[in-house]
Image (cartoon, rainbow, N blue to C red):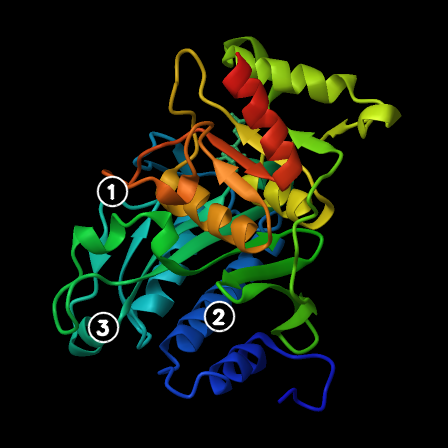
Amino acid sequence: MLLNRKILTLDEFTIQQLREFPHATGELSNLLRDLGLAAKRVNVEVNKAGLVDILGDAGSTNVQGEDVKKLDVFANDQFTGVLRHGISCAGIASEELDDYVAFDDAVSRQSKYVCLFDPLDGSGNIDVNVSIGTIFGIYRRVTGKGELASKADFLQAGINQVAAGYIVYGSSTMLVYATRRGVNGFTLDPSIGEFTLSHPDIKCPPSGGIYSVNHGNFFRYEKGVQNYITACQKKDKTSGGPYTQRYIGSMVSDVHRNLIKGGIFMYPGTVDKPKGKLRLLYECNPFAFIVEVAGGKATNGRQRILDIVPTELHQRTPMFIGSREMMDELEQNMTLS
Ligand code: P6P
């Protein structure tokens, strides 16, 4: 039963979904509400990043060997904190933390989910005011309720995700999340401080005219990828083009745009970095889940992203994701070469 209002908040939407599953415990709704709360707190700091000395390196470097910006640390603390003090999460893994964290208290030990996230992806763009984002994936734990979460809970194939989503801190702040029932987008309404349903039932167009890739690495990509990029540049009206190249350098923004408008995002491996740059567990798996539910595809060039069985928390993978027909054309080029 839809409430007698057009605008649903995130909480109202998740509770409405819950009402359709009487046996559901409400833990997933609680977890999504917790993530929404942390996102609102991060959004406040992101919006004023240029005004206070929250910019600049925190002096440390994270497991990726990258300079850590203070906002990275703040965002990580916010998402870790709300999940630790919630009632739905047994533990977390984060781009900013060397290892996973099992929440060792009686309530968390009884929780049935674990959450993996990149608290602030694209943080290199903070200082130049380019949009950045948070990416998260939610899994049912494989260890028993009452036990401490273990690494096995986090090293699950992406196909096991119960839900996945992202927040994009851009011209407006949006939270998009997917369950197997669909993908829905919520825009933060500052007047009431709530995420409100703005993009119901998002579908990825089967094709599009946007391709996103870092051209600077073109001659380091394998031949099939080079051939596909060249084919994108040669598209004309008779072959479904011309295509446009759009690459912000912030995965959340690039993939979000392509999800809505249709397109393909590529972060291929290179000669010197065959696994590419992007992280499987908390960058690629969540987006692969979301885009597949919306009707698109996501592979590492040879295998479905969601089928990859992880061996390490921070392992990298080449990433190709987007509209189904564009992905099929890419795969044909990679097979032929
Ligand atoms: P490059 C940001 O650092 C990030 O992880 C993604 O958000 C983005 O798509 C990618 O790296 C950009 O990497 O090497 O093209 O600058």
* Residue 320 left/right relative to 187: left
Inspect the image, locate mark 1, and give the three-letter code of the amino acid beneath it. Answer: Asp
Q: Earlier in the sequence, mark 1 or mark 2?
A: 2
Marks 3 and 1, how far apart in space? 21 Å
Amino acid type at image mark 2: Leu
Task: Inspect the image, locate mark 3, and give the three-letter code of the amino acid beneath it.
Answer: Ser
Q: Is residue 122 visible?
A: no
Mark 2 C-beta to ligand 1 under 8 Å: no
Left or right of 263 on screen, residue 267: left
Q: Residue at x 52, y 79 (%)?
A: 17
Asked if the residue at tag 2 contacts the one at tag 1, i.e. Cβ–Cβ closer than 8 Å, the answer is: no
> Does 199 sit above or below residue 71?
below
Disc 3 residue crowd, few under 14, some 14–19, many 20+, Cα 10 Å? many
Task: Please report contact status of discs 3 and 2: CB closer than 8 Å, yes or no.
Answer: no
- In this view, the residue farthest toward the top is 219
Q: Residues within 10 Å of mark 2 (few under 14, many from 20)?
A: some
Q: Which residue is mark 2?
A: 37
Numbered tag placed on residue 98 in the rendering: 1
Q: Earlier in the sequence, mark 3 or mark 1?
A: 1
11 vs 81, nearest the viewer: 11
Q: Quadrant of the N terminus?
A: bottom right
Is label 2 in a helix, a strand or a loop?
helix
Tell me the SS state at disc 3. helix
Q: Callout 1: 10 Å neighbours few (<14), some, many (20+)?
A: few
SS for dot 1: loop
Q: Nearer the viewer, mark 3 or mark 2?
A: 3
Splitting the image into 4 quarters, where does residue 160 fall? bottom left
Residue for point 48% across, 70% down: 37
Query: Which numbered tag is attached to residue 108?
Result: 3
